[in-house]
Image (cartoon, rainbow, N blue to C red):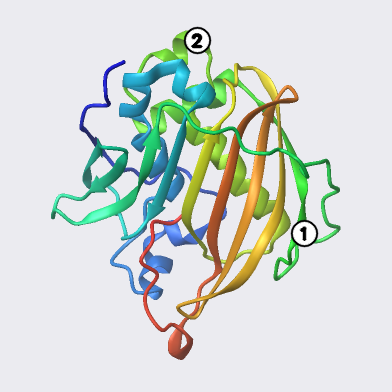
């Protein structure tokens, strides 16, 4: 099967109801020059050349690990390249904005320990190691088509087959954090993904998760958690996910977050 070809796309800020880091004024307070493109949308378009080359095989059994290293702003043209398994997303200035790896197949992770957990009565200020409350949402063809248009996805196969886009699945992993933790502006810093099956829509989507580590990075509060996404009770995505859930300002901000936000 052919290797993914280099691919250019224009990064976009799309509708974001809660995370204000995607608004100009808030982003500038944290040292950025404007609203940041969500990391999940960068991930979404990073998958375009992978799907173009590997198709359903990748979506049902492949892997991608993406770390968001530098800010990306609305309207920037980026270049995705996969060479010898090393994945890079480069900005118009030649600077690598995202870094990672990908393969058309990947080892199947253990799914032990993921189970239904009740949502907290109130979202917590600080997560602790242990289960997140599970998230349940209806996955619809209409939402998927809205998302394809919003991110500018050029591949027709998602519409032709009613397949949920990988970026839409990863948005559910973000929602797990948003439904469990009381967040201000926050930043999604990395996702290590294993695709386990194709989510055919419409489907009832479920996300289980567990916090694996909480700490501090550069003055910012960081959380790491594992998540499992299911479509009609069938596993479709496993993710090791990392986010800066509370951003420091003033003296506590040792350095500006060097990541693409989620």
Residue at position x 81%, y 61% from top?
122
Q: Position of residue 115 (x, y in %)?
A: 81, 41
In this view, 230 is above or below 256: above
Q: Dividing the picture into quarters, in which one does residue 207 lie?
A: top right
Disc 1 residue crowd, few under 14, some 14–19, many 20+, Cα 10 Å:
few
From the image, state whether disc 1 or disc 2 is nearer to you. Answer: 1
Q: Residue, x 40% and y 75% (percent of image)?
A: 29
Binning the other alpha carbons within 10 Å of mark 2 as few (below 14), some (14 to 19) or many (20 upward) gives few
Q: Report the residue marked by disc 1.
A: 130
Q: Secondary structure at mark 1?
A: strand
Q: From the image, tell me which residue sits under label 2.
A: 161
Residue 49 spot, x, y in % from top left: 30, 27
Q: Earlier in the sequence, mark 1 or mark 2?
A: 1
Q: In terms of depth relative to the viewer, which is nearer, 130 or 42?
A: 130
Secondary structure beneath label 2? helix
Disc 1 and disc 2 in contact, CB within 8 angstroms: no
Q: Horizontally, is 232 left or right of 199 in the view?
A: right
Question: In front here: 62 or 137?
Answer: 62
Q: Decide if residue 161 is on the left or right side of residue 91.
A: right
**Location of residue 53 by image quarter:** top left
């Amino acid at each position: 099967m052919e290797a993914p070809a280099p691919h250019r796309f224009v990064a976009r800020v799309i509708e974001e109801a809660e995370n204000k880091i995607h608004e100009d004024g808030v982003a500038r307070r944290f040292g950025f020059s404007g609203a940041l493109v969500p990391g999940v949308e960068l991930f979404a378009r990073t998958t375009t050349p992978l799907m173009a080359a590997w198709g359903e095989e990748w979506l049902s059994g492949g892997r991608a690990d993406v770390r968001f290293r530098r800010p990306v702003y609305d309207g920037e043209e980026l270049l995705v390249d996969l060479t010898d398994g090393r994945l890079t997303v480069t900005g118009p200035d030649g600077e690598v904005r995202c870094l990672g790896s990908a393969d058309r197949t990947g080892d199947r992770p253990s799914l032990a320990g993921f189970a239904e957990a009740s949502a907290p009565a109130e979202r917590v200020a600080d997560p602790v190691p242990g289960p997140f409350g599970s998230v349940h949402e209806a996955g619809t063809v209409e939402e998927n088509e809205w998302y394809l248009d919003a991110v500018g996805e050029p591949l027709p196969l998602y519409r032709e087959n009613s397949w949920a886009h990988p970026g839409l699945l990863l948005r559910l992993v973000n929602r797990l954090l948003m439904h469990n933790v009381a967040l201000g502006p926050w930043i999604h810093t990395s996702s290590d993904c294993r695709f386990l099956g194709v989510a055919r829509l419409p489907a009832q989507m479920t996300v289980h998760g567990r916090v694996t580590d909480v700490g501090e990075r550069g003055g910012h509060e960081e959380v790491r958690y594992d998540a499992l996404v299911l479509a009609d009770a069938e596993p479709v995505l496993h993710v090791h996910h990392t986010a800066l859930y509370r951003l420091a300002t003033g003296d506590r901000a040792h350095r500006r977050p060097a990541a693409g936000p989620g």
